[in-house]
Every structure is written in structure tokens, then in C-alpha cells.
């Protein structure tokens, strides 16, 4: 399988909505996102992509990009042709990984819909932090239940369908309640159980092995 490594600066556009799809990108470093841009200029971030994520979930690959694909932070990507992906997918281990990625991505998107439709502003933010804690733990980017958020409060507002005022106020509430601490973009979860209760968060939707979840939930050192 031939891959091409490419780097983009923060806020760099990678693929435009409606663009013909020729490759799938794998995020190697940094944070990226998929987003929808409305005719009136309003933007909705529909998903955050972290190291190891694919620019589009594999399955029935569309002929064109249904949403924009952009860097949130400086990112390094591996570009893989659709032909190489299809050829590799005939191997059982690769096929299993690709279909698991599709399942995982779909589960995240369903939870995102639930957050937008039913969770309060505070619950949405708490749920996002819980989800990022699990996802970043999987790629070794959590230390003592702390991690760096690669997005601004404006980005968080776009993700959660809130105003920046609501995001700022919710962060203050989570800090005041002793659930998290924050220094710049570094967030540390002080009470994981309490934060999950606040968020109505159950990691079962991620379909992870219980032993992996136990390791993630372990006490901070």
C-alpha cells in the first residue's frame, strides 16, 4: 500500500464539500474535523478527528465528499488511494479494522445527535470531555486523566450547537463543582465518576473491550 504523508497548518482546508473523492486520509498527528457550511455562512462541526481516525469511514465509499474536511491544529496525514484501501480490505485483519472504524464513527455520530437534541449545555460539554478522555486515552495522549484540547471555545460552540457564552459558562460551572481543572487548553478530570454522571455518559456505545475501559477508568497516579 502506497501512502503519501502531507502536513497542513491549523485552520487549513483539506477537502471541500462536494469534492470528488480520490483518497482516504488517516490522521497521524493533530486534530482535524468534518464540518458542514450552510449557504448563510454558518458552520457546524459534525465530528472531531484524532490520531488514527479516517477522513471518511470506510464501507461504501461515496464518490464525493459530503462535508468539508479541515485541520483544527497543525496536522500530519497519510493519504491512501481508494484502490489501495479496497485492495487491502480483502485481508481479514484490515477488513475487521475498517468495519470497526465504521461502527465506532457511527456510534459517535449518534451520540452527537442525542447531545444536540436532548442534553443541556452543561451535559453536552461534560459528555464531550468524557468522550475525548476515552478517545485520547486510546492513542496515548492522556496523562493522569489530563489532556490537551486542540480546539478553541468557538470550535466547541460549533461542535455542541451552543454559543461561546454558554461554553464559557459551562466550563466555569464544571470547574466550580470540582469536576475538572483547566490551565489554558490543558484539562484535567478531577472526578471521572462525577463528570460522567453529569454528562449522562456511558462508554458502552464505543464498543470497546471491558479491559481497555478498565485501564482508562483506573485511578490517576
Image (cartoon, rainbow, N blue to C red):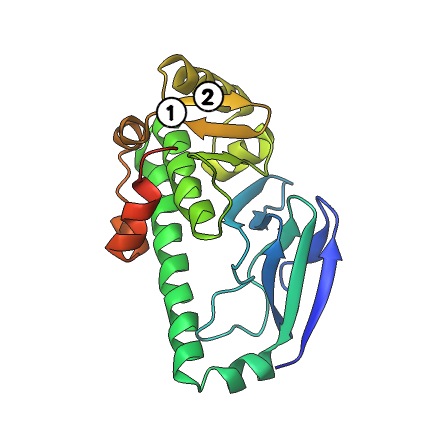
Q: Secondary structure at mark 2?
A: strand
- The residue furthest front is 221
Identify which residue, 167 or 173, lies in the foreground. Answer: 173
x then y, percent, for residue 110 = 34, 51
Q: Residues within 10 Å of mark 1 (few under 14, many from 20)?
A: some
Q: Residues within 10 Å of mark 2 (few under 14, many from 20)?
A: some
x then y, percent, for residue 76 = 68, 57
Return the residue at label 2. Answer: 181
Question: Position of 205 compared to 16: left or right?
Answer: left
Query: What residue is shown at x 52% (from left), y 34% (from top)?
Result: 156
Between the C-alphas of marks 1 and 2, the distance is 7 Å
Q: Give the quadrant of residue 219.
A: top left
x then y, percent, for residue 182 = 51, 22
Identify which residue, 163 or 123, lies in the foreground. Answer: 123
Note whether residue 21 is visible: no
The quadrant of the image that shows the C terminus is top left
Up the image or down, 160 lies above or below 179; here it is: below
Amino acid at each position: 500500500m502506497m501512502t503519501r504523508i502531507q502536513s497542513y497548518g491549523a485552520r487549513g482546508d483539506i477537502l471541500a464539500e462536494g469534492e470528488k473523492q480520490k483518497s482516504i486520509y488517516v490522521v497521524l498527528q493533530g486534530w482535524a474535523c468534518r464540518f458542514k457550511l450552510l449557504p448563510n455562512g454558518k458552520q457546524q462541526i459534525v465530528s472531531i478527528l484524532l490520531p488514527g481516525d479516517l477522513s471518511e469511514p470506510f464501507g461504501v465509499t461515496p464518490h464525493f465528499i459530503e462535508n468539508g474536511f479541515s485541520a483544527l491544529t497543525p496536522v500530519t496525514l497519510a493519504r491512501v488511494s481508494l484502490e489501495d484501501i479496497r485492495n487491502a480490505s480483502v485481508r481479514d485483519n484490515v477488513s475487521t479494522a475498517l468495519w470497526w472504524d465504521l461502527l465506532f464513527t457511527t456510534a459517535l455520530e449518534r451520540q452527537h445527535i442525542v447531545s444536540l437534541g436532548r442534553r443541556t449545555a452543561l451535559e453536552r460539554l461534560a459528555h464531550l470531555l468524557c468522550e475525548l478522555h476515552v478517545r485520547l486515552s486510546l492513542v496515548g495522549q492522556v496523562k493522569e486523566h489530563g489532556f490537551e484540547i486542540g480546539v478553541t471555545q468557538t470550535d466547541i460552540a460549533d461542535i455542541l450547537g451552543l454559543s461561546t457564552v454558554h461554553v464559557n459558562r459551562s466550563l466555569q460551572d464544571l470547574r466550580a463543582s470540582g469536576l475538572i481543572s483547566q490551565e489554558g487548553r490543558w484539562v484535567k478530570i478531577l472526578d471521572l465518576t462525577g463528570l460522567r454522571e453529569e454528562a449522562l455518559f456511558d462508554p458502552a456505545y464505543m464498543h470497546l473491550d471491558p479491559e481497555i475501559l478498565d485501564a482508562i477508568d483506573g485511578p490517576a497516579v
